[in-house]
């Protein structure tokens, strides 16, 4: 709505109200109430103000995070390969030892780490939407290399390149959903990335158990990025990106597509513009900006959350879940137990999307990491007893319980929230690079865990490995309690002011 339209509406209200005053007085309404009602009626009749439509926002977020399904299938792919890649060796008629298979499992995380900073720069240059669409190319190329593999080198390159594609969505998808969402549903949309990631992992687990062929699984995995491309190409670019490029008309059209044409987008557009201009008015360079108190604290929070997310051992569980159940001597078929774990994680993330904007980020992070500490402690005790042939001989299926509880609480807190908070705690001018660097750190930690998990197990046994994860969860609890702020329902400006205090 233009300024002139608002002024005309107000004049019309005053005129109408003056004529109606005696009647309103008899009904007990005050002049102020009448003005308010008349304004709402006139604006509504003009089609300028109403409730923003949320369905377009949900659809755009789901389309964007279809790429996370593809990334999840990259992560889950190594689990059906079996201990030391035995199924992979059989289906591809190739031999590999434990060390070579650890590289096959972990190189995807290294590729994801490598792309994190470049994709942040690319997303700022060509747009969040275009960057994600372009990165479908390495995704497909990587899977083609894996499908056609006849040597370990081809597997290594294929896994590394699919990791590049997966890492793209870890940065760009949360950034996209944060910039298209109203603040009231920003939290729920922010969890879509983790939800779709877990769905991708679950699909890999199920297909690995059902088709029992790694070659066929690789072909199916290569199709998912193409499905994402077809769905996402029709979605709008984010209004924030257009404003950064000084294209207000495109930003306005983007918001109309996302909110509906019955909603007054001007106030929200102005708020976005002011947040960007406030940083520009300071005249500070990027180097100066990252030295401000708010950005420094943002880095500490982002890096800390990523560190404790990975050092909880979650990716060791996801990548090597079949191996964990095999080592536990579980009476449940390892592939079936893995599917149960994957299903529990996906369902948990789904329910997490329903409560994250009601309970808040901080309380969910605390509840999550405290229970992760308890469950990794119990898993350590369980494996210690298994090693010493005591206590759990008759209930070897017991490992399934703490693993499922771990993933339930991880999915409510430390799974989605670190990714979701990255776009929330950084100012727009540093958001791309700062978030990307935190993502790089996350994937480097994931690489360390997935590459050296088997070495840790060999060195300190499974129980010692889970107790190391347990120790990091204790430290993470202290970190969240003292350093992580609540961002639920707050604007970017409010969050920045709190970090600057």
Image (cartoon, rainbow, N blue to C red):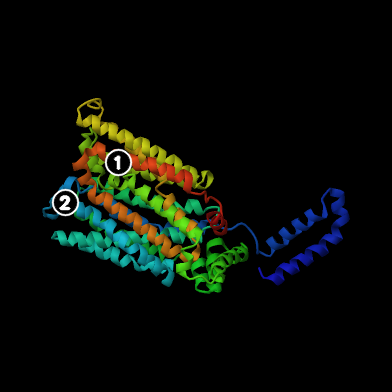
Please name the residue shown 51% across and 66% down the image. 240
Q: Tell me the quadrant of the picture where the C terminus can be found.
A: bottom right
Q: Position of residue 400 (x, y in %)?
A: 30, 35
Image label count: 2
Q: Position of residue 108 (x, y in %)?
A: 27, 57
The residue mark sitting in front, 1 or 2, is: 1
Please name the residue shown 53% across and 45% down the image. 358
- Which is more toward the observer, 221 or 357? 357
- Which is more toward the observer, 129 or 461? 461
Q: Position of residue 119 (x, y in %)?
A: 37, 66
Please tell me whether mark 2 sits on a helix, a strand or a loop.
helix
Q: Position of residue 315 (x, y in %)?
A: 30, 48
Q: Tell me the quadrant of the picture where the N terminus can be found.
A: bottom right
Question: Could you say which disc has been placed on residue 468 in the image?
Answer: 1
Residue 312: quarter of image: top left
Q: Does residue 171 appear to the left or right of 13 in the view shown?
A: left
Residues under labels 1 and 2: Cα distance? 22 Å
Q: Residues within 10 Å of mark 1 (few under 14, many from 20)?
A: some
Q: Answer above or below: position of 476 versus 5.
A: above
Q: Which residue is mark 2?
A: 99
- Which is more toward the observer, 279 or 491? 279
Report if residue 170 is visible in the image.
no
Please name the residue shown 49% across and 47% down the image. 361
């Amino acid at each position: 709505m233009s300024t002139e339209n608002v002024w005309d509406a107000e004049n019309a209200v005053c005129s109408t109200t003056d004529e109606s005053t005696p009647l309103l007085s008899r009904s007990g309404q005050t002049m102020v109430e009448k003005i308010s009602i008349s304004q709402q009626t006139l604006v509504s009749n003009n089609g300028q103000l109403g409730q923003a439509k949320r369905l377009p926002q949900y659809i755009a977020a789901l389309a964007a995070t279809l790429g996370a399904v593809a990334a999840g299938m990259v992560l889950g792919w190594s689990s059906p390969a079996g201990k030391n890649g035995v199924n992979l060796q059989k289906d591809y008629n190739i031999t590999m030892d434990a060390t070579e298979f650890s590289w096959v499992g972990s190189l995807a995380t290294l590729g994801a780490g490598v792309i994190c900073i470049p994709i942040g720069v690319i997303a700022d240059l060509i747009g969040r939407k275009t960057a994600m669409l372009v990165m479908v190319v390495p995704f497909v190329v990587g899977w083609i290399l894996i499908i056609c593999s006849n040597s370990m080198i081809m597997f290594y390159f294929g896994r590394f390149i699919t990791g590049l594609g997966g890492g793209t969505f870890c940065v760009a998808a949360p950034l996209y959903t944060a910039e298209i969402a109203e603040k009231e549903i920003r939290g729920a949309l922010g969890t879509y990335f983790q939800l779709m990631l877990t769905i991708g992992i679950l699909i890999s687990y199920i297909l690995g158990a059902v088709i029992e062929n790694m070659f066929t699984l690789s072909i199916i995995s290569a199709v998912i990025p193409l499905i994402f491309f077809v769905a996402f190409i029709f979605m709008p670019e984010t209004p924030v990106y257009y404003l950064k490029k000084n294209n207000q008309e495109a930003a306005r059209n983007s918001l109309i597509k996302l909110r509906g044409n019955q909603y007054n987008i001007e106030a929200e557009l102005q708020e976005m513009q002011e947040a960007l201009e406030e940083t520009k008015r300071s005249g500070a360079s990027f180097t100066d900006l990252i030295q401000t108190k708010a950005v420094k604290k943002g880095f500490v929070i982002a890096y800390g959350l990523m560190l404790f997310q990975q050092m909880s051992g979650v990716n060791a569980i996801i990548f090597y879940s079949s191996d964990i159940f095999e080592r536990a001597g579980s009476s449940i078929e390892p592939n079936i137990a893995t599917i149960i774990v994957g299903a529990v994680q996906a369902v948990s993330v789904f329910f997490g999307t329903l409560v994250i904007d009601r309970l808040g980020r901080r309380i969910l992070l605390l509840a999550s990491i405290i229970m992760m500490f308890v469950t990794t402690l119990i898993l350590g005790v369980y494996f210690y007893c298994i090693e010493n042939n005591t206590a759990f001989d008759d209930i070897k299926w017991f490992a399934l319980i703490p693993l499922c509880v771990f993933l339930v609480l991880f999915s409510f807190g430390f799974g989605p929230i670190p990714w979701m908070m990255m776009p929330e705690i950084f100012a727009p001018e540093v958001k791309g690079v700062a978030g990307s660097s935190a993502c790089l750190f996350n994937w480097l930690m994931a690489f360390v865990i997935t590459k050296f998990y088997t070495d840790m197990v060999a060195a300190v046994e499974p129980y010692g490995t889970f107790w190391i994860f347990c120790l990091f969860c204790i430290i993470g609890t202290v970190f969240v309690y003292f350093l992580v702020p609540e961002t639920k329902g707050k604007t970017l400006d409010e969050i920045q002011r709190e970090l600057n205090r």
